[in-house]
Amino acid sequence: MSEIKETFNFYDQTYLKSYNLDKAIQYQLNLLDSLDVYTREHSENVATITCNLCKKLHCSKGFTEYCVTCAFLHDIGKMFIPAEILQKPSQLTSEEYEIMKKHTSLGYKLCIKDTKLRPYYAGAYYHHEALDGTGYPQGLVKKDIPFEAQIIRVADEFDALVHKRQYKTHIGISDALNIIIDNTKPSPNAAPGTGFTKAGKNNKLIVKKLIKVVIDDVEYEISSTIDYVKYLDKELDRYKKIQNYIEKKNSSKKESDILYYEQYIDMLLKPDESVENFEALYQEFKDAYNLRKSILADLHKEIKIIKKLKV
């Protein structure tokens, strides 16, 4: 099974590479090394989603580069949050949550103090602000929240849901999108005198573009899975031939026939395969084929659901 390789990547870095961001963000990426593994991976994922969203929003190259760098740094303040809170597997207490919320202000202060980071403070400072005024740290409303932060908020929320639910593929991801869509609906907190607006937490336009990004991802996964299934199908055909020759060899009486079938078997076997491990490998390929066929059917169902989602 060592030769079986899938090419699908849930977080495709294509857009990041197309903007030649490697050199521009190297300094910022080095800072991410001080974060725990989960937060670093999350930061990279949010940057990828942000880049995809900017492309769908037809943002300029310059704004996209700026926005993606802000996204890389959005959780940089978490380097100052105690590990026992940051990595706590269970729900945070109200006191712990208040400490966790400080990562926005801490990230802002870090960026402001560093001349190289100062232009990108908006991601760290504003990514938990909500359009209806229910966010933090300042409780800003739509008109006061930078557009880059509105993009990063949606990317951040999506990746957090993906990790929380441990999606290994896009099957079931419509549930995550529905949660994000619900956060575009008018806030129930928008009563007179509360200071909250009727806007939802998330920008509707950005959420619409997120759905398009996810559709692209699902279609890419479907294409990758189809290619993988085709590869498995060819391998299963080869194994069927090997099995046929083994059966013929075992039923043969003549030494010449046995030698003939052995030669064909050897020709069909790959370097890490043998007659002894053939049956086990054959079963592994059958299982992999059946699993991917099932995933493919589920992905086709899922994309139909996603394409019907309304914001």
Image (cartoon, grey):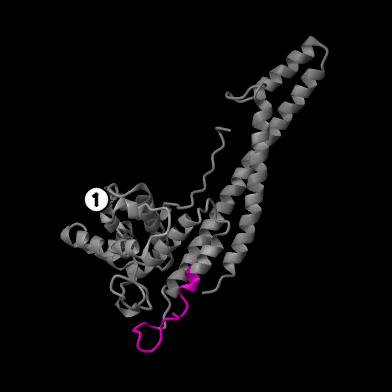
Q: Position of residue 66 (x, y in %)?
A: 29, 62
Q: Main secondary structure of the magenta part?
A: loop
Q: Position of residue 213 (x, y in %)?
A: 48, 62
In the picture, measured across the screen, residue 241 lies left or right of residue 39, that is right
Q: Position of residue 119 (x, y in %)?
A: 22, 63
Quarter of the view holding residue 132: bottom left
Q: Quadrant of the N terminus?
A: top right
In the image, which residues are magenta? 180-197
Q: Position of residue 236 (x, y in %)?
A: 68, 35
Element assignment for label 1: helix
Residue occupying the point 54% across, 43% down: 6
Closer to the camera, 261 or 181? 181
Residue occupying the point 78% across, 11% down: 256
Q: Pick out the residue farthest to the top.
A: 255
In the picture, measured across the screen, residue 67 lies left or right of residue 115, that is right
Residue occupying the point 47% across, 65% down: 210
In the picture of the structure, the residue carrying the numbered disc 1 is 27
Is residue 192 visible to the viewer in this orientation of the structure? yes
Closer to the camera, 16 or 141? 141
> Label 1: how many residues lie within 10 Å, few (<14), some (14-19) or many (20+)?
few
Quick check: 134 above or below 154? below
Quarter of the view holding residue 16: bottom left
Magenta stretch: residue 203 in it?
A: no
Q: Amino acid at mark 1?
A: Tyr
